[in-house]
Amino acid sequence: MLALDSTIGWLQLFGEPTRVRLLNLVAQEELTVAELTAITELAQPRVSTHLGKLREAGLLRDRKVGASTYYAASEETMPPAARALWKLLRSQIQDDVIDSDKKRMQQLVRAREKAASWPDAVAGQMERYYSPGRTWEATARGLIGLLRLGDVLDAGSGDGAIAQLLAPRAKSVTCLDRSERVMAAARQRLGRERNVRFTVGDLHDLAFRDGQFDQVLLFNVLTYAVTPPRALAEATRVLRAGGDLLVVTLEQHQHEDLTAAYQHVNNGFSVPALKKMLQKAGLAVESCVVSSREKREPHFQVITAVAHKS
Ligand SMILES: C[S@@+](CC[C@H](N)C(=O)[O-])C[C@H]1O[C@@H](n2cnc3c(N)ncnc32)[C@H](O)[C@@H]1O
């Protein structure tokens, strides 16, 4: 909710056609003042003035590359009230000027990309751009080669997709899942791997001795835990001294209408709450951060945490 003054302030900011044109362009592509001037055919001082206002309001970020400054806007980093208004505006506008801005911008970007080599054109932003074969999956599979794992427990393993990746780099991998059917699928997938074991069980009450594992994974399963602190305490108990617990889970959200279809029983965790729970379980938290944000609506965010048992 916003005070009347702030609401009017945002409406005034968006109440100027040039600012809407510029914001619409830099929301699609990083552009310099010179490029914006060429696209919009406005005078450069006018473009600079309005960009300055958008920047002051926190709607733009800039990036220096040599002598040029590139401007960009991302909804993700806009102040929430501005984001809401901008989303509404963007979804409603149908206008010839906006359409021809977009066409000219696309021509300019194509020309820019042709002029520079691919690495130079995307320097500083490489992860946002496609190049053949350079996928997150390929990167992750490459990085797995760095691992030297001991006895791993994959708690809430599902049908063994992660265990399949880790088994060649681990002494042993134990898949645990409460679903008989899912475990049968994991056995089918990995039955031939000599260092993989399968157990039907509950992560709140692990049927393992204390200190049996070097690494415990809780990947995408804490949102199924009725009592997350209990699940973390159990994971900690079965870790050896010197072992690590790795957690991947949703950040707290308000979309239970969507996650109910996947049988989640809680709405994820805030970073401080998860950190506290890990510490309470007796672990030293090495990192606990929001590490990614889904591109599609409603932009679920994911926490990854690494915690160590001393
Ligand atoms: C979303 S899947 C995640 C699978 C895998 N960890 C991954 O990240 O690909 C969640 C799995 O946790 C299992 N699960 C849910 N609650 C559990 C519990 N209390 N104990 C053991 N497994 C559980 C489900 O059966 C399901 O296979």
Image (cartoon, rainbow, N blue to C red):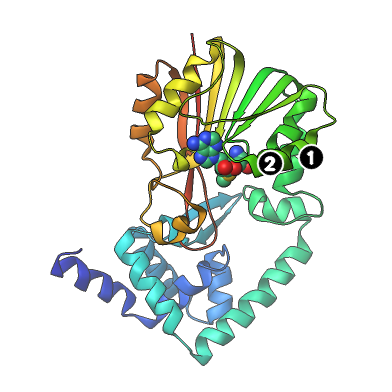
> Splitting the image into 4 quarters, where does residue 283 fall?
top left
Q: Quadrant of residue 177?
A: top right
Q: Quadrant of residue 228?
A: top left
Q: Nearer the viewer, residue 190 or 296?
A: 190
In the orientation shown, which residue stands out farthest toward the left? 4
Do we see residue 172 in this rendering? yes
Residue at (35% x, 55% y) in the render: 254
> On the image, numbered disc 1 is attached to which residue?
189
Q: Amino acid at mark 1?
A: Arg
Dot 2 beta carbon under 8 Å from ligand 1: yes
| Identity of the residue furthest to the bottom in this view | 96
Residue 90 in the image, given as x and y percentages of width and height: 44, 77
Quadrant where the N terminus lies? bottom left
User: Which sits in the foreground, 219 or 192?
Assistant: 192
Circle 2 Cα neighbour tier, 10 Å, few/some/many (<14 / 14–19 / ≥20):
many
Q: Position of residue 271 (x, y in %)?
A: 38, 36
Q: Residue furthest front?
A: 180
Q: Return the x and y of residue 27 as percentages of the image width and height.
A: 51, 67
4 vs 292, left or right, is left
Q: Position of residue 32 (x, y in %)?
A: 55, 64
Disc with the residue nearer the chain's start (2 vs 1): 2
Which amino acid type corresponds to the residue marked 2 in the rendered image? Answer: Asp
255 left or right, relative to 123: left
Question: Secondary structure under badge 2?
Answer: loop
Residue under the image location 58 percent in, 79 percent down: 102
Q: Check disc 2 and report the residue beneath it.
A: 159
Are discs 2 and 1 less than 8 Å apart at CB? yes
Which residue shows up at 78% across the image and 21% down it? Answer: 195
Ligand 1: give its quadrant. top right
Which type of secondary structure does the marked residue at label 1 adopt? helix
